[in-house]
Each structure stands twice: as structure tokens, then as C-alpha cells.
Image (cartoon, grey):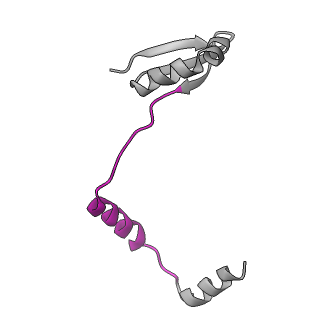
Amino acid sequence: MAKKKEVGAFEAKTHFSSLLEEVVQGHEVTITKHGRPIAKLVPVEKRNLTPAEAIERLKTLRKDQRLEGLDWKELRDAGRKY
């Protein structure tokens, strides 16, 4: 379970690098101002997809996309004007 920590804004500013190191370790840091929470530092979720997973996601995304009578070449050429 992630360790949770609460620090004031001044302390967060003063010790930002060390707080980031704690976040890298998986901890959460809540930053407060006058005792009220105003921000939270949390680790970014890492999710590396395999090539097969990425392809499946793209197929799913593409499945319901239709041009509905539009010509893709006209769209391409219109985009090249800018």
C-alpha cells in the first residue's frame, strides 16, 4: 500500500526534489495551503503495451469510425493546404 504524506505548500516548494523521489517510490504526497488540500503528487501509471495489444486497441478504436460519404483523398488534400 502506498504511503501517504501531507505537507504544506512552503515545505513542498523547499523540498520538491525529495518529494518527487518519494513519489517515484510509489508514495502519494498531498500539498496543503493553510491546512486545506490543494494538490496531490502521485506516481504515473506505467503500462507498456505489447505490439499485439496496441494493434488490437487500434482495431477497436477504428471499428466504429466511418467517413459517411466523404472522400479521404479530398480530406487529405484539404489538410495539406494549411
Q: Quadrant of residue 70?
A: bottom right
Task: Determine the residue positioned at 38% across, 66% down.
Answer: 58
Q: How many marks?
A: 0
Residue 71 visible from this viewpoint: no
Q: Position of residue 5 (x, y in %)?
A: 48, 13
Quadrant housing the N terminus: top left
From what the image shows, is residue 35 above or below residue 72?
above
Residue 47 is covered by the magenta coloring: yes
- Residue 7 vs residue 57: left or right? right
From what the image shows, is residue 80 above or below residue 36?
below
Query: Which region shows up in magenta?
Result: 41-67
Q: Quadrant of residue 64?
A: bottom left
Residue 21 visible from this viewpoint: yes
Which sits in the foreground, 26 or 32? 26
The residue sitting at the front extreme is 17
Task: Determine the residue positioned at 28% across, 56% down.
Answer: 50
Q: Position of residue 69 (x, y in %)?
A: 54, 89
Task: Determine the residue positioned at 41% across, 71% down.
Answer: 62
